[in-house]
Amino acid sequence: MADKILILTGDAAETLEVFYPYHRLQEAGFEVHIGAPEKRKLQFVVHDFVDGFDTYTEKPGHTWDADIAFADVDPGDYVAIVVPGGRAPEYIRNNVDAQRIVQHFFAADAPVAATCHGPLLLAAAGVLNGRTTSAYPELAVDVTTAGGVFENGGGVVDGNLVSARAWPDNGTWMKAFLALLAERGVTA
């Protein structure tokens, strides 16, 4: 049986930041599960950048079924976690079980990938103090408020954490994450 990786997400997650790691990690041979506040169909969104806008735009994206509710997750069943962005992290960061899962992986020094708004969950879980992470650049203040160091880049590695700014970094983000998994001996 393949090692399992859990993606922590919910409604309004950025489609590309869920699907790219989901399929890339499957391609590498891992069994990938989607965890969410509830086991049900999730509605993802598409964020895009438009000339003249100060921020991104949002449109409905794909739907996808969650495999497991956060409350039912035994973190010991998984070798790594992925925290995509979009708006989902704004509300899943308040979920005590999502925080519990993140805290387990940082306490175990196990691989974690986060992108875009994903570090909001890491901040709420209290694991960014003294850590360097990337995130959507407008979240730099959230990272530093949580005691972290913001780095504006894709594929930023700090120990067990691999982070990126947003979906344009998907390639460098997952390349660095797969390299970390291999370095740690985590193979499918």
Image: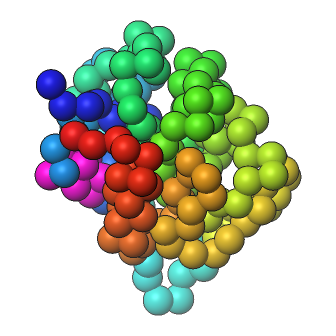
Residue 46 in magenta stretch = no
Q: Quadrant of the C terminus?
A: top left
Q: Nearer the viewer, residue 28 or 66?
A: 28
Q: Position of residue 162 (x, y in %)?
A: 52, 57
Q: Residue at x 49, y 68 (%)?
A: 155
Residue 25 in magenta stretch = yes
Whether residue 30 sits left or right of residue 143 in the image: it is left
Which of the colour schemes (rainbow, by chain, secondary structure, one colour) is used?
rainbow
Magenta span main SS: helix
Determine which quarter of the picture holds residue 94: top right
Determine which quarter of the picture holds residue 8: top left
Whether residue 181 sits left or right of residue 103 in the image: it is left
Q: Nearer the viewer, residue 19 or 180?
A: 180
Q: Residue at x 52, y 37 (%)?
A: 110
Q: Nearer the viewer, residue 75 or 59?
A: 75
Q: Residue at x 50, y 44 (%)?
A: 112
**Range of magenta residues:** 19-27
Whether residue 174 sits left or right of residue 93 in the image: it is left
Q: Position of residue 103 (x, y in %)?
A: 63, 28
State whether residue 166 is above or below residue 115. below
